[in-house]
Amino acid sequence: MRQRLRSSDVHGEDGPMAPWWQSAVVYQIYPRSFADSNGDGVGDLPGIVAHLDHLSALGVDVVWLSPVYRSPMDDNGYDISDYTDVDPLFGSLADIDALIAGLHERGMKLVMDLVVNHTSDEHPWFVESRDVSSPKRDWYIWRPARAGHEPGTPGAEPTNWGSFFSGPGWQFDPASGQYYLHLFSAKQPDLNWENPAVRQAVYEMMRWWLDRGVDGFRMDVINLISKTYPLADGPVNGPGGLCYDPSLVVEGPRLHEFLREMNREVGITERELFTVGEMILVNVEQARSHTAAEAGELGMVFTFEHVNLDQLGVKWDLKPLHLPELKANLAQWQYGLAEEGWNSLYFENHDQPRSVSRFGDDSQEFRVTSAKTLATTMHLLKGTPYVYQGQELGMTNAGFTAIEQYNDLESLRFHAEAVSGGADPEELMAAIAFKSRDNARTPMQWDAGPNAGFGQGEPWLRVNPNHVEINAAAAIADPGSVFHHYRRLIELRHQLEVVRQGRFDLLLPEEVRLFCYTRTLGAEVLLVVANWSPEPAALPLADLPSLDGAEVLLGTHAATGAELAGWESRIYRLG
């Protein structure tokens, strides 16, 4: 059994007591796509418990579990109708207790998804809120129709705000004659965090899960909880005369206050809890203000800047990734949070397509080596790395060719709007095939058998046909697989303090194919060299630290010469 990480086990550059999660590696599980134990086609908690040894063999420290709460599943569980129960689709509270126990027995911790910007419209809080005389009316954000407009008619919405899921951000409720705000689906009404009773109910729920054995929280769109009042129209910059101005809803004036209050009320710092905030459109300075130790707010945040570099504005307008731009962005975050705050390191999650298909090369020739090189580049940065289920296998995009194969709410709505607007069908489907969230949600590929070993019933989303070649059983049996490369990267982070706490320095920032940097702690220096292209690339030795006496700690290829093969990468310990 692996020893569970504690702060007292972790030493930073200036001495002991760095938070334990600065040494950790996180594995995200999207429950409906991980493993199906009962043959209904949907992954579940017993399915996860049955595969805990896979996670233990990989060496991860923390499991982040996407929502398993009761939900109508309008947005695959991110619309919650009961925060303190498990949806029968996934199992029961007894099953989650078994998961917590199984993880703890193996030295791992469990982080739950905390979705508290909004609830489901079927949550009892909202059902009661629909009554204008209810004490919970003010638990959500209700407003009358725009002056001079008939309630429920187009243009009568209280403001011109658009929803992140497209269309107006207000939904008319005929029973009460007013509108409620929903920044996402109309079935996801926003909570009113200005109301202290709402905040206390959230904190009580968080403590309930902690008492059950949970070790922390990933906080969904947490920087939207504070709105800017009074709610008012913004500049029209979207279709239908709508405003998509993030300044109206992102990083609101009371956000710091709310997060500090949450930390105190729940005991986040005191209990050494793992916390990461998903923060839309957050910049380095804002992230530092939330994650610096003295802020008393969060451990780290998710930024989106680096995963938006292959698009022009909205996610569906594609452009090729320019490596110097990616390097500059990641370096900005490395330098910006070097002394205060902490970075989250990721290329994939349940909302992003598969990185080997997006940033790497998923061809038969380069899939394995490019998946390894992407992993090396990310895992040797300073911060807490995140591995999304199947990423450790080099799983690829889904390969869907028809809109009927998709389940993702965002993709389906975009397709419907684009078709009605006269979009080119071929370009439209190419964009969806490249960027849809369903690329990350196809069932986990456990073996080459029927349904990829996911379960006996027909899966809720089509299994990728390449599971015959790309699967966990084959990867574990192959010492040169992507899985074992990830395992070795995780071992390096656990073994070497320079990986955890060393200073980052970017090299060759303008190189269009090479991603090179150093990590330094005292006299120890690591050099990472990575060729992000299918063509061989000579190492500009005159512009790199001397390789005399250097040792290759981990590489994608056996060679150690002055040229990198296509998608080759190495980690050197310098002499």
Image (cartoon, rainbow, N blue to C red):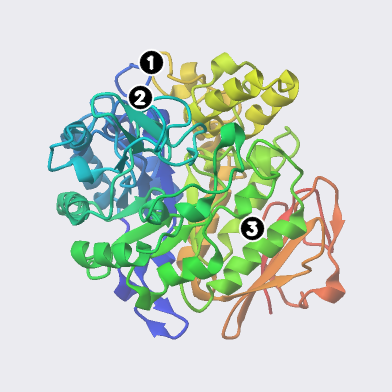
The residue at the point 63 percent across, 77 percent down is 525
Q: Nearer the viewer, residue 368 or 95?
A: 95
The residue at the point 18 percent across, 49 percent down is 205
Q: Which residue is mark 3?
A: 377
Describe the element under mark 1 as helix, strand or loop. loop
* Label placed on residue 239: none
Three-letter residue code for mark 1? Gln
Callout 3: 10 Å neighbours few (<14), some, many (20+)? many
Image x and y of residue 6, in percent: 30, 68
Describe the element under mark 3 as helix, strand or loop. helix
The residue at the point 79 percent across, 74 percent down is 544
How far apart in space, not on screen, are marks 2 and 1 (Cα)?
A: 8 Å
Residue 298 in view (yes/no)? no
Quadrant of image for the N terminus: bottom left
Dot placed on the residue nearer the N-terminal end, 2 or 1? 2
Describe the element under mark 2 as helix, strand or loop. loop
Q: Which residue is mark 1?
A: 456
Does residue 478 appear left or right of residue 278 in this picture? right
Three-letter residue code for mark 2? Asp
Name the image quarter holding residue 119: top left
Q: Which residue is mark 2?
A: 36
